[in-house]
Amino acid sequence: MATSSIFTNIVINDPKKAEKFIDALETSSHDPAWKPTTPVKPPLTDIEAIRKLMAKRVSVK
């Protein structure tokens, strides 16, 4: 399951490594540079376009 990896306990014994980890978390939370990997297509609202799409689906079977 994909969510199981986010519930892992992290043990850091070295204070310098702990400080670097905290700094990295703070830096990433200030300005996340997230961009979608693929362009988002708007939903189909045109009735004829929906019919064409459904017609392709029926003919494939």
Image (cartoon, grey):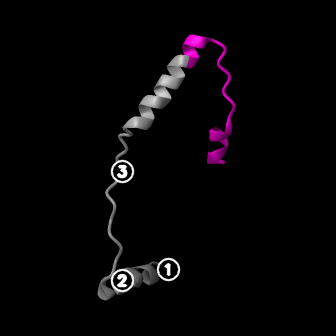
Residue 19 colored in magenta in the image: no
- Quick one: 5 or 28, which is closer to the camera? 28
- Quick one: 8 or 30, which is closer to the camera? 30
Q: Which residues are magenta?
A: 1-18
- Circle 3 is placed at which residue position? 36
Residue 2 colored in magenta in the image: yes
Residue 5 versus residue 36 in the image, above or below:
above
Measured from the top left, where is residue 38 in percent x and y? 34, 53
Q: Report the amino acid beneath label 3.
A: Pro
- CA gap, disc 2 to disc 3? 25 Å
- Circle 2 is placed at which residue position? 50
Residue 13 versus residue 58 in the image, above or below:
above
- Circle 1 is placed at which residue position? 61
- Quick one: 25 or 39, which is closer to the camera? 25
Q: Secondary structure at mark 3?
A: loop
Q: Nearer the viewer, mark 1 or mark 3?
A: 3
